[in-house]
Amino acid sequence: MANIVDYAKLNCDLTFKEQALSIEDALVLCELSYLKFDGLLEPMSKEPVSIKELASKDNSRNMFSDPKYGKDYEKLFNAALASKRFGDIAFSFYINKIEVENETQFAAVTYTLPTGDLFLAFRGTDESIVGWQEDFMLALDIPHAGRSLSVDYVNEVAANTVGRLYTGGHSKGGNHAVFSSMNADPSAKERIINVFSFDGPGFRPEVIKEYHGEDMVDRMVSVIPQSSLVGLLLDTGKDSIVVNSHAVGVMQHNPYYWVIKNGRFVRTEISEQHKLLIATFNEWLFSLDEAHLERFVRLFCEVLDATEASTTRELTGQIFKSAGNVIKRAKDVDDSTKEFLQGLIRSYFEIAKDLVKTEVKEKFDEASKAIKSSKKTEKKITIKGDKENE
């Protein structure tokens, strides 16, 4: 099945001047932001470096030095380099900032397209458990230094450039793209055409309201796989494009598994069971105050640590093997924490019960309407038949 690497290879004949930026293009650009540009691009340099220049540098292979995903990154970069469509893009304003004290790693890069448009791509997280924990903290609006850095980044790029802007990112990067676009200076904000979030966590409603994000909603493009978890955390109600993935469970978060056919994502729908699961979880999270949210996230991260899994793949494959460690960790917590968790679980099931009742009632009402409609149709047919027999 084709993915974004195949897309970059097969869509090599049309330039951005001949065909406007698509959602698939945006994902390619967002994924290229994962490359390790340190030592290849000057930090926050305004001077664009073409993709061809980048490839010709002596240390260019450092871009693919990630031990887990380096091969995927190399395939995507080479496909983009060889294509007519991506072969003329240039890189600038690269930043990779690590703040140990704030447990934050923030990275972004800006692409200059042949049209003169700029695409600001925020690096996201990978399939590591640490990255997943970071996504969760973002969704629950736990204070995070990366968000303020993302706003500064958009304002800095906008102040030193002209032309239309696009922002985007995958996972944490998607959250940063949305947050920075909502909070950018008015002069930068009005230049933003679209904001792309690929399976990025959302925001609590009060965050959207506080930062006047309503005026950006029509410019936001959300793309999620059919079994999304991260991308549906605190879903803001913005309709998402749901795409097919040939991975299972949490591994669908990896966009290299998303299916593309004839140059476009294969679209699908989220199952009713998954919708109910996420709706229940989100409703529960909305019901918690800030203090309870933060405490819950800390405990959630402790439970993930107890599994001793380093990636979501391991978490999925070894969940039963890890159960003993999780239970042991649960036993080790103090009485007040146990009481806190019990209270959270009770509140969760109360909300779950109400949501299930609502869904059952909706299904019953739909069935009743269908029966009534069927009876009316049957009655009309009978009356018509009776008249024809007269």
Image: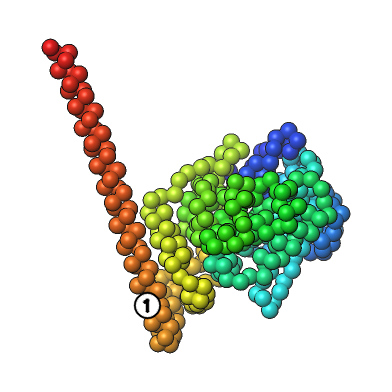
Task: Give the residue displayed 51% in from the left and 42% down from the top.
Answer: 267
In this view, 116 is above or below 129: above
Return the residue nearer the eye: 226 or 157.
157
Residue situated furthest right in the rendering: 47
**The C terminus lies in quadrant:** top left
Residue situated furthest left in the rendering: 390
Tally of numbered discs: 1
Residue 70 shows up from this direction:
no
Q: Amino acid at mark 1?
A: Gln
Classed neighbour count for the residue bearing mark 1: other residues with Cα under 10 Å, few (<14), some (14–19), many (≥20)? few
Image location of residue 45, percent across then percent down: 85, 59
Task: Give the residue displayed 20% in from the left and 28% down from the top.
Answer: 378
Query: In which quadrant of the rendered view does residue 149 lie?
Result: bottom right
The residue tagged with tag 1: helix, strand or loop? helix
Return the residue nearer the eye: 350 or 265.
350
Residue 134 shows up from this direction:
yes
Which residue, given by chain and number where applicable, does mark 1 sit on?
Answer: 342
In this view, 141 is above or below 215: below
Image location of residue 186, percent across then percent down: 73, 54
Q: How is the image coloured?
A: rainbow
Image location of residue 341, percent across then percent down: 41, 77
Task: Give the residue displayed 69% in from the left and 77% down from the top.
Answer: 100
Image location of residue 272, percent across then percent down: 38, 51
Query: In which quadrant of the rendered view does residue 142 lie?
Result: bottom right
**The N terminus lies in quadrant:** top right
Return the residue nearer the eye: 52 or 219.
219
Task: Give the residue displayed 48% in from the left and 50% down from the top.
Answer: 226
